Every structure is written in C-alpha cells, then in structure tokens.
Image (tube, rainbow, N blue to C red):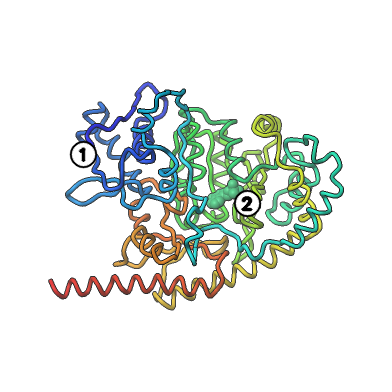
Amino acid sequence: MTNELPLQIDNTLKQGLQSQLFSEIRRLLLGGYLRPGTALPATRELASRLGVSRNTVLLAYERLIAEGYLETRPAIGTFVSEHLPESALYLERETPPIATQASSPVAHTAPIFHGIPHAVYNQDGDRLSIDFKVGRPDPRSFPVNRWRQLLNRHLQLARDNLTEYHDPVGIRPLRQAIADHLGPARGITVDPGQVLVVAGCQEALNIIARLFVQPGTPVVTECPGYQGAVNLFESYGAAVLPVSVDREGLVTEDLPLEGARLAYLTPSHQYPLGHTLSLQRRLELLEWAQRHGVYLVEDDYDSDFRHHGAPLTALKGLDRADSVIYLGTFSKSIGAALRMGYMVLPEALVEPARTVKTLLNNGQPWLDQAVLAEFIASGGFANHLRRIRRLYLQRRDCLIAALERHFGQVKLSGLEGGMHLAWRLPSGAPSARVLEAALRQQGVGIYSLPSGAAFCSGHDSLVRRTLMLGYAALTESQIEQGIERVAAILMHRHEAQGTTAGTS
Ligand SMILES: Cc1ncc(COP(=O)(O)O)c(C=O)c1O
C-alpha cells in the first residue's frame, strides 16, 4: 500500500481538482513510481489527506479505472492495473522512475507541459502475427508504383522547390485538389483558400487548441470518444465536458446549455463505437453551435469508406453559419506514415490558423505535397479508393461472418462504414482486457477501448464488454484464424469455469 503519494494538487488552478488528481496519479504511474499491483489509498483517506471531497477522489479513480490504469478488487480496494493500457506501457519504459530523477545531481528546469500520448503507435505490432489494430489501411494496397513514378517526376522537375520555403498553408495544387475532391465526396463546397494542409488530424487539433484553448476552457467531446483529441485538449488545460453517444451519435439533448467554447466530434463513424450522426442531430448540433457561438470540430477521419447507404453530407456541407472546422486525413485512405491531412477553415480562422501553422513548422514537405496533389488530380486517388473500398467491404463481411459462425448472433456496431467495428462481448465472456491480454500472448492483437485510443470516462461496463476490431489491414484468412483463436480462448475459459463449478 502506498500511503504517501507525492501528489501535487493546487486548488488555485483553473483546472478542476478531479482532473488534476487524475493527471497526477497517471503521472506517478507512467513515471514508474506506482508499479502494477500497487494498492492505492482508500478514497476517504486520500480525500482527507489532500483536503478535497471524497467525491473528487472517487471520480478521479473511476476515470483511471475506465481508462485501464487502475482496477478494483471487490471488498479489497483499488490497485494499479496488472495490464496497463498500451500507451502507458511504452511511456513507462521511456520515462525514468521519479526516484532516479530525484537523485540526479543536476536539477534542470522541470517542463510545465503535462500531456499523455494516445495509443496509436503500435509499438509491439511486430510481435503479433494477426493484428486487428484499429484504423490501419492495407499495407499491400499502398500505390507504390504510381507513388514512385510521381516522386521521380517531381524530383526531376523540382529546381528550387526543394530548397525554398513554400506557403505554410500548403502548395496551391494540393489545396485545389483537396477542394475539388470534397465537393463530390462530402458535399462540401469550398474555396482552396480555406484549405490548410497539415500533418494529419493530430496537427489540426493542435492548431485548433492553440487558437482556442487555455487552462479551464470548456471543450465538449463525445464519450466514449477519441483519446487523441481529449488528451490533446487536456494538455492545453481544457476542461473536457463529455457528452454521451447512442445509436444516432452524439446525444444533442445532453449538450451543455452554456459555457462550451468548442465541440469535437466524429459524425461519420463515431469513434470508437462507429455510429453515424443522424441528420436530425446534425441539424440540432449546428443550431446549438450557432446559438452559443461554439465552433464544431468535425473529425471525418475514415469517411472515405461507406459500406452501406449513401453517405450523409458532412456537417461542414450543411453549415450555413461558418461554425464548422472540418478535419480530413490521408492516414486512413493512403497511409498514416505520410502524415498528411487538411483542415477546411471558416473564413474568420484562415489567417489566425496560417499564423499558427507558420509558427509551428512553416508547412509540410514540398515533395510529399506535390506527389499527393498530382495523385489526386490525375484520378489516381479515386481509383485507389474504389479498389480498397471493395477490399475492405469484403474483409468486413468476412469478419462478421467469422464472428457469427463462432458466436451466433453478435452485437456489433459501426458496420456502415470505416475500417473497424465494435463488438459487444457475449455475457459470461471474460472482460475485454483479460481477453486482449490472453490473445496477445498468442500473437493476436485485439483491442479493448482504452488500448484502442478510446476515451471512456465513467463507462466501466462498456469498457469491460467492448472489443474493437480493425479489419482493413488483414487478409480474409488472417481474419478467420484470428477469430478462431478468440473463440478457442473463450471456449477454454468456459470449460475451465464449468469444471470449477462442477467440482465445487
Ligand atoms: C478519431 C480519429 N481521428 C483522427 C485520426 C487520424 O489522425 P491523423 O490524421 O493524425 O493520423 C485517428 C487515427 O487513429 C482517429 O482514430
């Protein structure tokens, strides 16, 4: 038991006590001060020592439990999880324990930044023979030949393009190609001047946070939602306001009546559960944003893949009041390693965003932009999308069929589009985390919500019962073998339980 946690809580800060306590405990955990299995102080005791309400401690513990950092053992107490979320595992190895830092002879200036990375970098992916990692395109479908041709051509014609600085918001041909693509693809009519080329959605979120977020700024996010966005906003000190989601996406009825400055959401394929925001809710959301002067951040990360029905027009396409900041990425449609995405900005934000992008990095690499621009403008991107859409649909169907073959009627969400689905585990199955750990030992990657970069504060039962399965990067035979191994583990556990019950 750790009674003397060196927690630094300051009630003069704008950041709420609960959020501070959450970050502090997570800091100790990631720094190696709290090891897996360590018992945490009882909530009443910790509350009294810190001079905060017991509820504050309870809520901070609940969130740490939901995100997989802590676990409860009924009637015993709260402990550091034996199986930490993936993001914690690799941070732990990289950050020296606090004890080592303290004994270091030179005390350098401590960083004031407190941010937590989200689990997108699949650090032990090489050890998995079958990996249902979420949101990965098929590596074998990368358009290598066309890319090589375009690279060679642009290198030959480059002249001073490789030695000069370019417009930080992106080269004109790429902004034009993106604007031309968005009309037919997403119902967004946009002038290329409103397009800003960025290093993926993650940089776009940084630009937005730089423009709007300071300690205490209220930011609405979906819950469950995307950890990459929540962690980013929290790293700027935002007070995150989680709003629940259901089958129609974000529950607009639960939106705060006042105070919000920004709202971040994934309307096309809600992350992580995969629901599509209904048209009615889209309209209500736009009306709410306009009434309260809130900017909506529409993260359209995997909307290139719509398996059923016509795609709903993007929020941005319905936006008459310039309330929507639209984010697109090529991470899903071509490859995450390109680090290429874009924002479509309301008029009023074009210049402020240009300034932030200039201060950040003076723009994206010219060669990558030139190649991508021609890839889109020459029709290569449309062909590539047509090809991989077909492939991903087949893989999705193969996954559904494999799940049904082994488990009968399965509760799935997110089937209409995207590259992953969420599976509500059958009752009696071990928790998602236990399954994830067991399968990992056999070289199969399946993902509980926290390991799949999902933010799920206060959703313990959803976390216990939900698995995320990405299918786009796996062959049909890998999908079948992977689900067969999931079934074997479940069957084995079921039999072991039956044996125990029979002998007791
Ligand atoms: C919800 C969501 N948004 C955006 C991204 C993509 O981010 P980026 O464009 O920075 O690669 C991801 C990737 O996993 C995601 O899950």
Which residue is pictured at 41% across the width and 48% down the height?
89
| Circle 1 SS class | loop
What residue does disc 2 label? 337
Quadrant location, the N terminus: top left
Any mark on residue 417, and which? none
Q: Amino acid at mark 2?
A: Ala
Where residue 269 sits in the image (x, y, percent)? 55, 56
Residue 299 visible from this viewpoint: no
Quadrant location, the C terminus: bottom left
Q: Amino acid at mark 1?
A: Ala
Relative to 197, say whether 50 is above or below. Answer: above
Which residue is pictured at 48% across the width and 34% down the height?
235
Binning the other alpha carbons within 10 Å of mark 2 as few (below 14), some (14 to 19) or many (20 upward) gives few
- Specify whether 50 is left or right of 96: left
Where residue 85 sits in the image (x, y, percent)? 40, 50
Relative to 159, say whether 444 is above or below. Answer: below
Where residue 213 sits in the image (x, y, percent)? 53, 31
Q: Quadrant of residue 407?
A: bottom left
Circles 1, 2 touching at the beta carbon (< 8 Å): no
- Specify whether 362 is left or right of 93: right
- Specify whether 384 is left or right of 130: right
First in residue order: circle 1 vs circle 2: 1
| Circle 2 SS class | helix
Where residue 486 sits in the image (x, y, percent)? 40, 70
What residue does disc 1 label? 42
Q: Quadrant of residue 457?
A: top left
- Specify whether 59 is left or right of 304: left
Which residue is pictured at 41% across the width and 74% down the height?
409
Calculate the distance from the C-alpha at mark 1 to the C-alpha at mark 2.
Answer: 44 Å
Which residue is at the front of the view, 43 or 249?
43
